[in-house]
Image (tube, grey):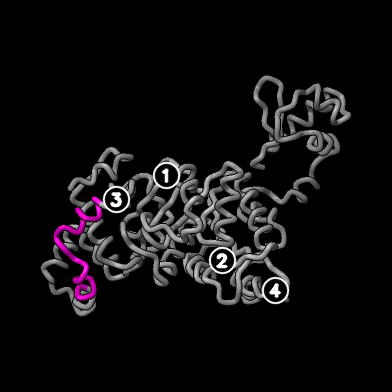
Amino acid sequence: MSSKSIRRDFDATDFEIAKALITWNALIEPGDRVAGELIRTLGPIDALEAFISRRDLGEEARDAFARWAPRYSDSLADEKIAQAKKNDLKLLLPSDSLWPALLNDLGHHSPLVLWYRGNSNHLQDLGRSVGIVGSRNATHYGHRVTSDLAALLIQEDAAVISGGALGIDSVAHRTALQCGGLTVAFMAGALDCPYPAGNLSLFDQISHRGLLLSEMTPGSRPTRWRFLQRNRLIAALSAATVVTEAGWRSGSINTVNHALELNRPVFAIPGPITSPASAGCNRLIRDSQAAILLDIADLPIEMGWRGDSEAELAGLGTFDLRTLDALTPGYQSTEQLVVASGLTLSELRMALGSLKLLGKVDSDGSGLWRLNNRK
């Protein structure tokens, strides 16, 4: 069976390689190191032939072959393609130009393929992305700081990455959507087995306005192991991970461990020492596994997206500061800015020229000015 329909977003596909990878995707559990090494060494087609013929590649490979054998059938790829077509799932391959390169940092534990729902063009917009993770049993405090953080990230043109779970994940996704930004949900099970059921409406919204991603072959239910392995993908796809609220034994700590292994920055928002819901965040800070985020506005500075505003303002002159106070995110004419700033036209023009060189203001070229939202 051709995989053309599940590859309709892409022009060129080697369908033999695609079918081999789909077969491997159905054979193994996520993050299988032996399979990853075998495929990287031999290529997906030759590796599959080695498995089918039970080529002697050493004791570790023999054990792995025995582990994979119960799932294998000659029609396995065709069955999965049929399931994907039925459920409108599309396939992303590591050879695709849109493949998120950050995932390759996982080495032999990288996903073999990704299944997705949504606009594949969004895959180009993940260069600036932050993972938000935390407890399923979020408190009002957790909801508030997560919502504020997600809104800030969208304002900074960053994508919000999370896992689609109840609690913190849901707040992060919903806020990103409400703010008109990009959000990506990495699912622990296949996209045709969405979990939790209480988030079906949210998943539908994300699939239309963001991206639903999974490495799990169609028909695969989420399991405890798959949740843990899914966390490595959130950590890998995110330029940084922020834990907004998490208990002592929260699964989000697992995501943090993956991020640390990948040398990705990790931040945690502290909570009251009397709150069990924040015990995980407080422990991460105490053990120096996460940098403390006392003010969410500090995150763009920590990520290098913005300079330290207080230090920058200290170097500005009086005319510059008064002009900045008068500017807004929306365009204004010089006449409006003269009134708002109390400066003369020549003083204002001097300040605008200085601020433009610093990248703090934008002009539309016709005499209208606004704050540069990225500075």
Q: Gap in Å between the C-alphas at discs 2 and 3?
A: 29 Å
Query: Which of marks 2 and 1 precedes in the sequence?
Result: 1
Residue 292 appears at what percent x and percent y? 67, 66
Query: Which of marks 2 and 4 precedes in the sequence?
Result: 2
Residue 100 appears at what percent x and percent y? 41, 51
Please identify the dominant SS of the magenta region: helix
Circle 3 — which element? helix
Q: Amino acid at mark 2?
A: Arg
Q: For mark 1, does the 10 Å Cα neighbourhood hold few (<14), some (14 to 19), or many (20 or more) residues?
A: many
Question: Residue 77: which quarter of the image?
Answer: bottom left
Residue 110 appears at what percent x and percent y? 36, 61
Query: Which of marks 3 and 2 precedes in the sequence?
Result: 3
Res 275 label:
4
Query: Which of marks 1 and 4 precedes in the sequence?
Result: 1
Question: Is label 1 or label 2 in front?
Answer: 2
For the record, the magenta segment spans 65-82
Asked whether the residues under the numbered discs 4 and 2 touch, taking CB atoms below 8 Å apart as contact, a structural biologist would say no
